[in-house]
Amino acid sequence: MIGGRTSDAIGRKWTIGLAAIVFQAGAAIMTFAPNYLLLMTGRLLAGVGIGLGVMIAPVYIAEISPTISRGSFTSFPEICINVGILLGYVSNYAFSDLSEHMSWRIMLGLGILPSIFVGCALFGIPESPRWLVMQKRIDEAKSVLLLISANASEAEERLADIEEAAGTSNTEKHEEMGVWMELLRPSPALRRMMITGFGIQCFQQISGIDASVYYSPTIFKDAGIQSDREVLAATVAVGFTKTIFILVAIFLIDRVGRKPLLYVSTIGMTVCLSGLALSLALLADESVPPKFGIMAAIFAVCGNVAFFSVGIGPVCWVLSSEIFPLKLRAQACAIGAAGNRICSGLIAMSFLSLTKAISVAGTFSIFASVAALSVLFVHFAVPETKGKSLEQIENMFQGGREWQGSEVELGDVEHLVLREN
């Protein structure tokens, strides 16, 4: 939420720069921490930096991308996150033979390098044209649009759409209530946006993906793998699978659309999580051979992260950055990102306690049930946004005619909006 206010105050790209600086400071403190207190202080700072980046990067990319490829571009933060996770797994495996006091410090120190690159790259990229319009810097916005549009006429058309969206969002109401009050007392259209955006953020995490990724060594040991190096190797396979299938999502998201990928993702996760719970339960009862149970567990975990990565993983961030009105976008995305991280933290902190109380198999049965609910959520609460400009998507929610994914012509939506007003 602080990130939303910051991005409106200093701009989208400089908020990304601030996120990189805060993360660098946190990672450096962790790398050289002489005691537990400083280690946790660094972890807190790094978490703040990551939170800022997770919130603002999809917003910036969505606001600067052309409509036809916005989904693919907005998915790039997810691929970068997963490349980082994969490199973490690989470095964990590579440095496992070093002393326990040195290996983790080297891993944390290496994490500083990408953020330095991001900070330097900011001096060569433009500011969001939509943010510039909000700041009444129209000439600068036009210059940016000329850089990122196919021709001058397209730039003019996009600028006109942005100005209309920025200037027709009930300015008096914003002045009276403020952005945050409007989020607390949303209109019917904004309420639909919030249900979609915040709901998909929460379902992304409460279906247990972080438990599958962070605690995969625990899962594999519970399945019967004894060697630490074999556990680490299986964990690297999980990270590799997760990264590869995000590339598939980037290729498909602007071709087949957001909603079909979400269906494939949530249904596939439900099947894989159910299979993982069943295989672990059968192993506990010694109803299947150990080798079969181990292979089934590895296949189910890799399948779960693959289906996550091809759909709800990247599409969650794409949708959240697309659906909200311009004047509310940063704040709404900040709230959604905060909810996502809170859900992630709750799952991470409760996983081990749940496994002790109801077993690993029982815990993943709960995650499978949540994934099944997410299929229904996608069907009833997520519209298709492929091929629509950000301004058209806003009009679509105002019209309320595409709540379950049916196609609506922009002219019909504009007619409904005018009739409502």
Image: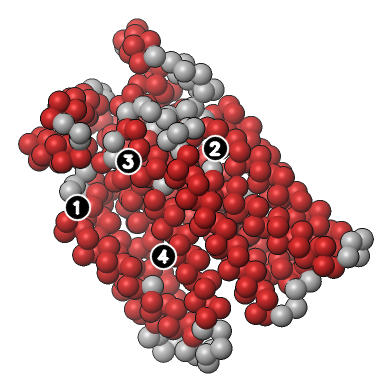
Q: Secondary structure at mark 4?
A: helix
Query: Which of disc 3 and disc 1 is earlier in sequence?
Result: 3
Q: Quadrant of the C terminus?
A: top left
Q: Is residue 391 above or below residue 340?
A: above
Residue at disc 2, secondary structure: helix
In the rendered image, residue 332, in percent from the top left (x then y), is placed at 37, 41
Q: CA distance from mark 4 to mark 1?
A: 25 Å
Which circle's residue, 2 or 1, is located before the other in the chain? 1
> What mark, if any, has residue 125 been given in the picture?
1
* Residues under numbered marks 3 and 2 in contact, where contact means CB atoms less than 8 Å apart: no
Q: Amino acid at mark 4?
A: Gly
Of callouts 3 and 2, the N-terminal one: 3
Pointer 4: what residue? 47
Circle 2/circle 1 CB separation < 8 Å: no
Mark 3 vs mark 2: give the one in front: 2
Regarding mark 3 in the picture, which secondary structure is present there?
helix
Q: What element does badge 1 sit on?
A: loop
Near mark 3 (Cα within 10 A), the count class, few <14, some 14-19 or many ≥20, is many
